[in-house]
Image: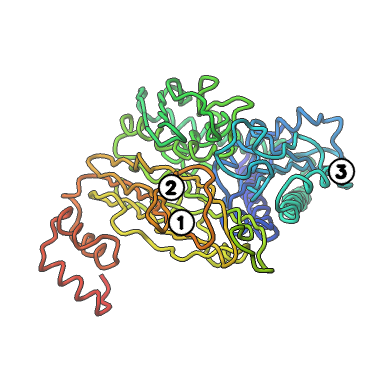
């Protein structure tokens, strides 16, 4: 390939990335659910005619986009190329052929140019409600977790399937919101298609064969170069987390070999009775993400850059659950996958990976309704409110962890104002949690406090989706553990970290989300950083003294200067 051709191909590759980013941003602007509009719980990508992912949007979550990398091939197989026409739109929420649970809607649109199929656009969004028991861990099998939409046509040649929409509306609690999200998904794919055709016209392309070959060949070669520069080796990683009724053990053996890295999840706990199980596609997504972040972070995600990371897991383990296992909260376990991989990778590549963080999102969903203990006011109403929140991330080898920042999901914390706007909920408190970041040479990121109730005249069920209650994030290289999760009523009565629980009229749920763990010994922390943490309220005076050894006179000086508004 000539230098001119290489430059043109690189320009087109960058253009594809910008196209799918515009696709994702269009979804954010048009979606109805706050999980998409405010938290960015979505993904978008473009594929060649074979169904191989060429580019993904920067906006979105690795659990969605890396899982969605495999999805288009399922659509091609189920629909059949001979049944694909211009104006078609396909849809599913199949956990095993989509992105891991029924609350994710995946929409795929074929892209035609001059009557020829040249590729596909796909996108995924987490929806607030899909019927059934509602979003939570309480189901005993996948059939209880809501409406199932097999891979099928949402629209054929531009005509929407009204029967499908009627079925959807009749089975969910927020029908307008869900239908609006489906149309938003379809629309953002259409925007991607238009931009792709514009690009192909600009560069005189009749198909994507050459640019596809350029992207996939260069991505694969670059990834293999990174892998083959590593010292071969094998190491085992392990993490114990809360689970539902009993703790879960995640175990992985990571093998760095020529041209590949293999992650084997043999020895991991079996399928759980409740909805915290993980389809293999989601385990693969977060295992790949962990390895790519550590080894080849700047190489764009596509089919070829993901291929050298091979993931295997025995069937009917919690990381390779088969139907009809309940999987609604597959993210609670799946988000712990990267830190388990890093437990092994730290032995193979010391000084590279962070300490453990909060891991899974600190999610909860409120099912609000008019009070039943007395006559409810006439303006009381039913509503489903889902909110995404984050604990702290783990400290890094040369940097503190990030406060209230989701790793590995990257999902954003929802603003209080957006949450309170969609239903009769009140967020009484939302603030950083001092001393929750694990001590170390580099401190773990802080978790949050959050107190939640309902507006007058309402009672509610809270579906908790928390972990790290009994198993807080572990430090690395002498760093200390992060703060554990807690959830309780305003009376101090402890509540369960997972599951649907009733809160009476006037009641409140008080939560403390977990902190990330520390990296390195606390005795090695720079005292200037300790003083700054104290001034900012990240640590208490007691921690500054007892954990980091700051003298009483220094503590008093920091507090005095802080009251005066001095900058540290």
Q: Residue furthest front?
A: 374
Mark sitting on residue 163: 3
Q: Which badge, 3 or 1, is on the more N-terminal residue?
A: 3
Which label is found at residue 535? none
Q: Are marks 3 and 1 in contact (CB under 8 Å)?
A: no
What secondary structure is found at the residue carrying circle 3?
A: helix
Is mark 1 in CB contact (under 8 Å) with mark 2? yes
Distance Cα–Cα, label 3 vs label 2: 42 Å
Residue 89 image offset from top left, x and y in percent: 80, 43
Whether residue 262 appears in this view of the structure is: no
Q: Quarter-wise, where is residue 337 in the image?
A: top left
* Quadrant holding the C terminus: bottom left
Residue in the foreground of this view, choosing between 348 and 311: 311
Q: Distance between the residues labelled 1 and 2?
A: 9 Å
Residue 240: x and y, percent? 37, 32
Q: Which of marks 3 and 1 is in front?
A: 1
From this viewpoint, is residue 465 visible?
yes
Q: Which secondary structure, mark 2?
A: loop
Q: Please tell me whether mark 3 or mark 2 is closer to you in this view.
A: 2
Q: Which of marks 3 and 2 is nearer the N terminus?
A: 3
Q: Quadrant of the N terminus?
A: top right
Left or right: 259, with 521 as reference point: right
Q: Name the residue under label 2.
A: 495
């Amino acid at each position: 390939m000539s230098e001119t051709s290489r430059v043109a191909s690189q320009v087109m590759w960058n253009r594809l990335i910008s196209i799918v980013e515009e696709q994702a941003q269009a979804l954010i602007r048009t979606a109805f659910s706050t999980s998409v509009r405010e938290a960015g719980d979505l993904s978008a990508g473009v594929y060649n005619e074979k169904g191989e992912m060429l580019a993904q949007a920067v906006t979105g979550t690795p659990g969605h986009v890396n899982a969605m990398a495999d999805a288009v091939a399922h659509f091609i197989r189920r629909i059949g190329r001979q049944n694909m026409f211009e104006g078609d739109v396909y849809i599913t929420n199949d956990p095993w052929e989509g992105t891991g649970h029924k609350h994710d809607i995946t929409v795929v649109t074929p892209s035609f140019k001059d009557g020829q199929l040249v590729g596909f656009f796909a996108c995924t969004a987490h929806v607030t409600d899909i019927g059934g028991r509602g979003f939570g861990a309480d189901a005993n099998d996948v059939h209880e977790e809501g409406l199932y939409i097999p891979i099928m046509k949402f629209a054929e040649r531009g005509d929407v399937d009204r029967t499908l929409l009627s079925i959807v509306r009749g089975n969910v609690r927020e029908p307008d919101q869900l239908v609006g999200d489906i149309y938003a998904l379809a629309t953002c794919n259409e925007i991607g298609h238009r931009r792709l055709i514009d690009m192909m016209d600009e560069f005189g392309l009749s198909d994507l064969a050459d640019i596809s070959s350029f992207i996939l060949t260069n991505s694969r070669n670059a990834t293999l170069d990174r892998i083959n520069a590593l010292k071969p080796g094998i190491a085992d990683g392990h993490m114990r987390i809360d689970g539902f009724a009993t703790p879960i053990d995640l175990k992985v053996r990571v093998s760095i070999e020529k041209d590949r890295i293999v992650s084997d999840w043999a020895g991991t706990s079996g399928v759980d009775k409740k909805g915290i199980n993980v389809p293999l596609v989601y385990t693969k997504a977060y295992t790949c993400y962990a390895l790519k972040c550590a080894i080849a972070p700047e190489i764009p995600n596509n089919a070829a850059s993901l291929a050298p990371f091979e993931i295997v897991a025995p069937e009917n383990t919690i990381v390779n659950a088969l139907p009809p296992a309940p999987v609604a909260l597959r993210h609670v376990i799946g988000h712990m996958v990267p830190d388990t991989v890093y437990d092994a990778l730290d032995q193979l590549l010391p000084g590279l990976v962070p300490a453990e963080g909060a891991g899974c999102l600190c999610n909860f969903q409120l099912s609000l309704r008019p009070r039943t203990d007395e006559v409810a006011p006439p303006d009381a109403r039913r509503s489903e409110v889902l909110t995404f929140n984050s604990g702290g991330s783990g400290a890094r080898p040369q940097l503190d962890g990030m406060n209230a920042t989701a790793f590995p999901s990257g999902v954003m914390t929802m603003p209080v104002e957006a949450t309170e706007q969609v239903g009769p909920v009140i967020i009484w408190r939302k603030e950083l949690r001092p001393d929750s970041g694990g001590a170390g040479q580099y401190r773990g990121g802080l978790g949050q406090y959050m107190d939640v109730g309902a507006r007058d005249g309402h009672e509610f069920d809270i579906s908790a989706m928390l972990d790290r209650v009994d198993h807080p994030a572990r430090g690395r290289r002498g760093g200390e553990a992060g703060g554990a999760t807690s959830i309780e009523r305003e009376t101090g009565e402890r509540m369960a970290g997972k599951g649907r629980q009733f809160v009476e009229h006037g009641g409140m749920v008080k939560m403390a989300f977990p902190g990330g763990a520390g990296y390195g010994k606390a005795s090695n922390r720079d005292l200037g950083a300790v003083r700054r943490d104290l001034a900012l309220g990240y640590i208490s005076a007691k921690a500054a003294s007892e954990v980091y050894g700051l003298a009483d006179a220094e503590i008093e000086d920091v507090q005095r200067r802080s009251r005066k508004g001095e900058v540290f």
